[in-house]
Amino acid sequence: MKAAVIYKKGELPKYAEFSEPIVQNENEVLISVKAVAITNLDKGIVSGDHYSSENENQNGTVIGSDAVGILENGTRVYALGINGTIAEKALVEKNRMIPLPDGISDATAASMPNAVAGSAMALRFRAGIKPGETVLINGATGFTGQMAIQIAKHYGAKKIIVTGRNEKTLQSLLEIGADEIISLKQDDEAIVAQLKAIHLNSPIDIVLDYLWGHPAELILKALKGNGSFTTKVRYVTIGGMAGDTIQLSSGILRSVDLQLSGSGLGSWTKEEVKLLFTEILPEMFLLAVQNKLQVNIETTSLVDIEKAWNIEVPDGKRLVVLV
């Protein structure tokens, strides 16, 4: 079969011939792959930068972690891969497989799960979002950030504040549910002042942070209390696009009721992952069919994988490989 293969971490994936995977037990099933999204997770694994990266295989490794495909009986499904999925065939787990509703395209269905996991899981299981709460999304101009806005609104958020550097994209977020925007192109003092003013007027209950790094330091500085009672803030880090580390003052932790946690692979419980596949993703696929969730997609073909791997995808779009 044809597949996207890497032979060494950091190199571009190659369009190559690869052995078709073989079902090893009753918990596995083979699908004919139709579409696979390329995510930051996939790029991190390929480069070796992500904590879940595996050791190199001199015989090559098929890349991709999930897929939309078709079972032998013709059922169209989204599924988590056991091995690489950007290929004509892929092994997937039976208990992490979801039949897709009519009306959703292969590309749309493939684009959504990573972003849903990167937003809904944090909102539900780390932040415990409740209707009527105020949510700040740090780094909302990307594909997952845009999904987070819409899902937070679906879960009942009363007010959604977003940050980002792309001014044009920030303005467009007002059309999908954002209420206030904060440009990270401002100087630090202006960003902190804007955050403090918003927090004073509409206390922030939840922060979803896709950037970390210096922008996170500014948000935490703005949340710092003065010795009076404070609103509990559930701060969830999901990504580190602006840096993997921060400096955190002990005074911030002592002056505000702050819950700091992370959401990602390894942090979720088995029960939470089960709910992702049995409840959350099926609901989100249906919302997409009903045009209540908007996604922006660019597509490429498997044969062009090497050329497409490092192309600059416009802010807020997801690149999907069609097989």
Image: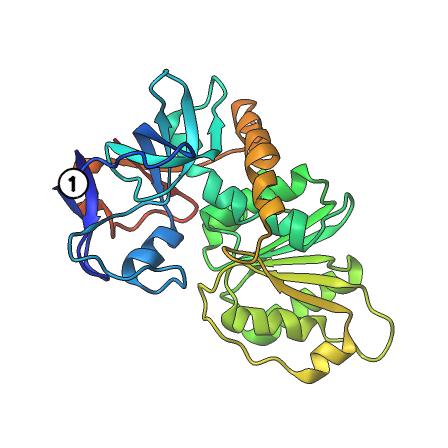
Total residue callouts: 1
Q: Amino acid at mark 1?
A: Phe
Query: Within the image, what quadrant is residue 90 found in?
Result: top left
Q: Which residue is mark 1?
A: 18
User: Which residue ends up furthest to the bottom in the rendered image?
Assistant: 250
Residue 310, percent from left and from top: 25, 52
Q: Residue at x 69, y 54 (%)?
A: 127
Please identify the quadrant where the N terminus is shown: top left
User: Taking 159 as reference, is 145 left or right?
Assistant: left
Query: Within the image, what quadrant is residue 189 found in?
Result: bottom right
| Above or below for 166 versus 75 | below
Q: Residue at x 48, y 39 (%)?
A: 113
User: Which residue ends up furthest to the left in the rendered image?
Assistant: 17
User: Which residue ends up furthest to the right in the rendered image?
Assistant: 228
Residue 43, percent from left and from top: 32, 55
User: Taking 115 as reference, is 195 left or right?
Assistant: right
Q: Residue at x 38, y 62 (%)?
A: 50
Query: Within the image, what quadrant is residue 79 found in?
Result: top left
Q: Residue at x 74, y 57 (%)?
A: 205
- In the depicted view, which residue is nearer to us: 27 or 308? 27
